[in-house]
Amino acid sequence: MKPLPVPERLTKNRFLLDEEQCNIEVNQEIARASGTGKLLVACCPAHVYTEEPDGTISVEYAACLECGTCLAIAAPGALKWHYPRGGFGVQFREG
Ligand code: SF4
C-alpha cells in the first residue's frame, strides 16, 4: 500500500471541538513585544494563528494538530497551551 502524501493525510483528520474550554491563550502584550505573534503565524502548520490589522493575534483552536511547535517557539509568558480535555481535539486517521 502506497503511503499518502502529508497534505492528503491531514485531510483525513477529525476534530472534536471542546467548546467549553479553549486550550490556547495568547498574552497579546508579551507576544507583540517579543515578536512571538509573527512566529506563531509563520510556524503553525495548521494556521491556527492569524495577525489582525491592529497586531492582535487571533486563535482558531479548532484546527490545532497538537504538534507543540508553538510552545517551542513562543517567548516565555506569551502563550498558554495545554492538550484538550480527554476525548476532545484531533484524531489522526492516517498516522
Ligand atoms: S500545537 Fe501545533 S497545530 Fe496546534 S497551535 Fe501549536 S503549532 Fe499550531
Image: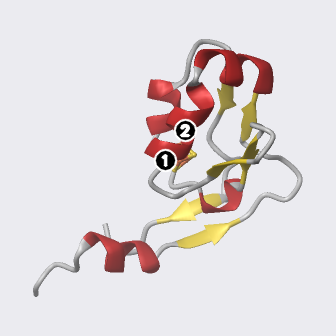
Name the residue that disc number 1 marks: 44
Front in this rendered view, residue 18 or 62: 62
Q: Is residue 35 above or below residue 17?
A: above
Q: How is the image coloured?
A: secondary structure
Q: Secondary structure at mark 2?
A: helix
Q: Which amino acid, by three-letter code, is at mark 2?
A: Leu
Query: Image quarter for residue 56?
Result: top right
Q: Who's the residue at 34% across and 74% down the image?
A: 7
Residue 55 screen position, x and y as percent: 75, 37
Front in this rendered view, residue 94 or 86: 94
Q: Residue furthest right?
A: 20
Query: Is label 1 within 8 A of ligand 1 (CB to nearest ligand atom)?
Result: yes
Name the residue that disc number 2 marks: 40
* Residue 89 makes an appearance in the image: yes
Q: Who's the residue at 10% across and 87% down the image?
A: 1
> Which quadrant does the C terminus fall into?
bottom left
The disc label shown at residue 24, or none: none
Q: Which amino acid, by three-letter code, is at mark 1?
A: Cys
Q: Residue furthest front?
A: 53
Q: Is residue 22 left or right of residue 89?
A: right
Q: Secondary structure at mark 1?
A: loop
How many C-alpha atoms fall within 10 Å of the one at disc 2: few (<14), some, or many (≥20)? many
Q: Who's the residue at 16% across and 78% down the image?
A: 3
Q: Who's the residue at 55% across and 44% down the image?
A: 41
